[in-house]
Amino acid sequence: MGIERGDREFCVSSSFKSSGQVSYELHDDVAVMTVNNAPVNALSLAIRQDLQANIERFDSDASAKAAVIVGAGKVFIAGADIREFKLPAIEPHLPDVIDRIEECTKPVIAAIHGVALGGGLEVALGCHFRVGVKGAKVGLPEVHLGIIPGAGGTQRLPRLAGYEKALEMIPSGAPIGTSDAKAAGILDHVSEESDAVAAGLAFARSVIDEGTPMRRCSQLVPAAVDAKMFEAAKLAVAKRARGQMSPVVGVEAVEVASQTSFAEGMEKEREMFMALKNSAQHRALSHAFFSDRALGKLPEIEGVAPRQLKAIGVIGGGTMGAGIATSALMNGLSVTLIERDEEALGRAKATIAANIGGAVKKGKLSADQEVRIFEEALKLSTDYGSLSNADLVIEAVFEDIEVKKQVFKQLDAVCKAGAVLATNTSYLDVDAIAAVTERPEDVIGLHFFSPAHIMKLLEVVVAEKTAPDVIATGFQLGKIMRKVAVRAGVCDGFIGNRILASYRTAADAIVMDGSTPFDVDEVMLEFGFAMGPYAVADLAGLDIGWATRKRKAPTLAPNERFFTFPDRLCEQGWFGQKTGKGFYIYENGARKGVPNPTVFEVLAEERKQKKITEQNLSKEQILERYMAAMVNEAAKVVEEGIALRPLDVDMTLIYGYGFPRWRGGPMQYADEVGLEKILNNIREYAREDDYFWQPAKLLEELVESGRTFADLNAGKGSQSATKT
Ligand code: CAA
Ligand code: NAI
């Protein structure tokens, strides 16, 4: 390996030319290597090559007595380059580069600012010392991508910080701050400097002057440990992970460190890492990572500035209005809340106070902030005129189009020019609401989920005439409120509730035809949902579905199946959790119920009346039907442009409906299962019920052309070709 000292572009092999993304600069007798790969200094091939070359250079540079590795820009290093994971791995591999750092004969110091995550922390663990500046964070978040640290993190961290710390950090993926990291021995020093180079240089000086012995994590002797600790950790982690593999494998990898030599541990870590890297869970979680970041990247608002957002209005202080107001207040906005009368205002205020008080107890807000909210930020009124200065108003009154139209007429009369007028409707036509105003371009749907101060999802519903800067303002509000905003179009139920209605219908059919609600719930729990659909129905209140069915009954198509078995429960006053009985029985206010035996009788009676021959569906068949309904409706939602891309559907279901993130959402899941298989299933089910099971054109088209939903996400072929 030839190195021409002093030359910026030097060779480490006959074919390698440095890209210069890791610079090498001497500060007296200390070499500073700066990793520069915006935006987060990910360890791409070029960075690994450069880093390796610079380490070689440092080792043979007689004028350098120590080296400091720093990151340019906002962070130290955010880990491996996730975008390269899909490509064949090219040498030098990260573990080898890190081994080379550790093997250096002179001290190497990692000076960390911003974050050192994943491979970034692993690089730091390969160094002989680690310094953090104020506000820095270190972590191994790989489990969130469905993998484990693959460059020695699972073997070096327990040796350096102990098994307990490693078992806390690796399976959770949560980063820790400087004081925690210092206490755990991960950082040798926390600097008062804000500049990482200065902090690293000062530390290097002291190491050189004091001759501090170099410490190599791989050579530290792990403390003795009781194997039972790992068993307990595996059980606890598996319970929380609900089917996700990586956190459990993370525990196993740490356990390996307690059983073998470092070299053997590294081999095992590699095997585990590679197995996960090739898994569907890793593909799903990477998809979720990039989808999160793609949600707000919309051509229609690119470069469009949002309107001012300081003071907002909320109309209606019921379940949703009070939650929305809470969320806005917690995130620094001023809120004027309008209700029909003083009594309703009092109830709204009490709900908000309870929400805010809860946030203070959990340490999410300070007591001072609580005082400020009630003394300055929140105003309560029955007079729409007090909204004249609001930048944005969110209506959350009863789900009744006439009531909403009335509210919007009043808003049109009192709100200032340029104010955004938003509705939180779940199903109603936002275009029809906009049409009653003189300013439909200012009207938008902002569909929050209950409880609105906790749930992450916000559907930004774009109506026909909504102006681009109003859309941008909707996304901006999502950002301020720390929500995940997804663009949706206008239809009955937008993205989420429309798809929900479809898979709920499929579930009812499955139950009517011979399974029980408890079978369906069990299958969906095993799939990774936190709750099955019938437990969710009990939680939301069975009266909601009952009212919907009553409205729907007169409008049924002749060949449309209609499921009334839940009505038999409602008729007895059983509305779910709030009445102590529904599909489940909730003894003494318990939140988890036991199956209600009356459900079996009700179903037997209904099947008899409707002359249904019971089918005995296996768990797999239940899952296939449920997911086929979800995917088929989701494909229609994309086909019609209600969701712009499959990824918008995936994130909606993950953040609003409990779809397991590690499965990536229904569209990602469908790609994994195979679209052809799903389409064939739908065609098969259509033989029994050709009203419900009408295949989405988009699904047929993708199968025909051999494409996937991921292809649409990547812009390969547009779904608009099939727009109805
Ligand atoms: N590789 C490639 N690209 C990355 C990346 C990574 N590790 N981390 C972030 N990016 C990209 C993002 O996709 C985004 O790209 P676009 O602008 O094109 O959307 C851009 O960098 C900025 O990211 P954010 O929007 O997330 O910026 P932020 O300032 O809000 O957050 C961050 C910065 C905290 C570093 C956050 O990006 C993050 O958590 N990144 C992932 C860290 C991670 O998971 N590291 C482990 C990687 S796996 C690994 O290292 C395995 C191993 O053992 C070797
Ligand atoms: P709610 O019945 O709890 O609250 C509605 C509130 O609006 C009541 O307090 C009522 O006094 C007030 N109100 C009615 N007319 C008014 C008027 N003209 N001026 C001022 N206040 C008025 O209803 P909820 O559940 O909060 O729903 C509100 C809206 O949010 C509906 O459109 C609903 O579809 C939607 N939504 C509901 C979700 C839920 O889970 N409850 C989830 C997402 C959206």
Image: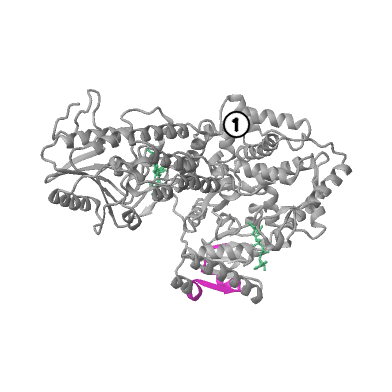
Front position in the image: 524 or 449: 524
Within-10-Å neighbours for mark 1: few <14, some 14–19, many 20+? few
Instruction: Tell me which amino acid carries mark 1.
Output: Val
Residue that sits furthest to the top in the current view = 14
Which quadrant of the rendered structure holds the C terminus?
A: top right
The spot of residue 329 in percent (x, y) is 50, 66
Residue 469 seen in the current view? yes
Q: Where 598 sits versus 25, above or below?
A: below
Residue at image x 48%, y 43%?
Answer: 247
The spot of residue 529 in percent (x, y) is 61, 46
Q: Where 579 sits versus 427, above or below?
A: below
Front position in the image: 138 or 322: 138
Q: Mark 1 highlights which residue?
A: 673
| Residue range (magenta) | 373-393
Which quadrant of the rendered structure holds the N terminus?
A: top left
Name the element at disc 1. helix
The spot of residue 129 in percent (x, y) is 25, 47
